[in-house]
């Protein structure tokens, strides 16, 4: 009995649809969960001027660690932690500053709309709320702040394999804190401002890496 393709074309179409869909999801599976780590430089931006304390324009290090989950190929979420160290510039009163933050951000792959970019190049935007923790060192260790922030940034990445990529990131953390601070003349140095940082890092798949090319 000859095979009647017209009779079974709907079933064949459904099977092909699910086969293609499963194959597509399996190819993206390694992008679902990713570990992100980067290292770079920072510049704290103080809301109060002329208090006798100001940092260098370039401070090291900035360390960022995060976990990212992609809901689709373009849209995801990221939970990350950042640690930054800054020191006084020439002419400033001496101090050291530890600035830490935790942020939950939305992630969007902008490069999917920039068709002129090569497939190996990724451009990713990220933005979201968080909490900043600042702690001076030395004599001013009590002058701590904890305050809300909003962070936004842009990543320029290069995909080496489906499991591994490298990237450069430029981000700005806007502090949602008032201008009131400890009295510098009496209490010493404190910080509740913004932060700009630039880092380079890696993004590694946390799922099915054994099968990634």
Image: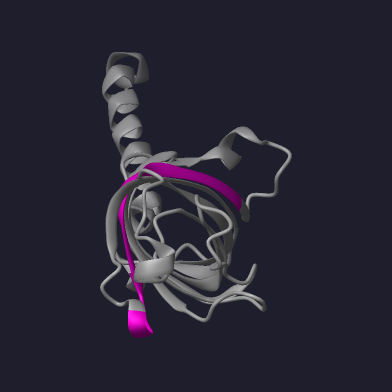
How many marks on residues? 0
Name the spot of residue 28 as percent of width and height, x first. 39, 50
In the rendered structure, the answer to whether residue 99 lies left or right of residue 95 reads left
Compare residues 115 and 173 and report the one nearer the observer.
173
In percent of the image, x 26 and y 23: which residue is there?
A: 11
Q: Is residue 14 above or below residue 206?
A: above
Compare residues 149 and 122 and report the one nearer the observer.
149
Residue 2 visible in the current orientation: no
Q: Is residue 125 above or below residue 156?
A: above
User: Magenta stretch?
Assistant: 122-139
Q: Is residue 111 above or below residue 142?
A: above
Compare residues 127 and 72 and report the one nearer the observer.
127
Which quarter of the figure is the N terminus placed in? top left
In percent of the image, x 59 and y 51: which residue is there?
A: 122
Name the spot of residue 185 as percent of width and height, x first. 43, 67
Instruction: Give the overall secondary structure of the magenta segment.
Output: strand
Specify the farthest residue to the right: 116
For residue 59, what is the image quadrant?
A: bottom right
Name the spot of residue 29 as percent of width and height, x first. 33, 54
Instruction: Check the image and tell me how it is coloured.
Output: one colour
Specify the farthest residue to the front: 186
Q: Is residue 16 magenta?
A: no
In the rendered structure, the answer to whether residue 21 lies left or right of residue 170 reads left
In percent of the image, x 56 and y 54: which residue is there?
A: 49
Residue 9 visible in the current orientation: yes
Q: Is residue 73 above or below residue 81?
A: above
């Amino acid at each position: 009995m000859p095979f009647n393709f017209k009779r079974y074309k709907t079933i064949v179409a459904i099977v092909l649809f699910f086969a293609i869909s499963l194959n597509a999801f399996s190819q993206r599976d390694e992008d679902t969960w990713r570990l992100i780590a980067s290292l770079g430089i920072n510049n704290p931006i103080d809301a109060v001027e002329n208090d006798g304390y100001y940092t260098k324009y370039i401070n090291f290090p900035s360390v960022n660690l995060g976990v990212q989950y992609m809901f689709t190929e373009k849209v995801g979420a990221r939970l990350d932690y950042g640690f930054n160290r800054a020191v006084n510039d020439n002419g400033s009163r001496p101090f050291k500053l530890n600035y830490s933050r935790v942020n939950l951000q939305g992630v969007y792959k902008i490069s999917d709309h920039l068709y002129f970019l090569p497939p190996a190049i990724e451009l990713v935007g990220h933005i979201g709320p968080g909490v900043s923790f600042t702690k001076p060192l030395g004599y001013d260790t009590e002058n701590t702040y904890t305050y809300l922030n909003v962070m936004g940034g842009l990543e320029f990445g290069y995909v080496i394999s489906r499991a591994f990529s490298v990237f450069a990131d430029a981000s700005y953390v806007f502090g949602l804190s008032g201008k009131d601070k400890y009295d510098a003349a009496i209490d010493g140095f404190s910080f509740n401002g913004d932060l700009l940082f630039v880092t380079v890092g890696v993004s590694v798949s946390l799922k099915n890496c054994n099968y990634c090319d």
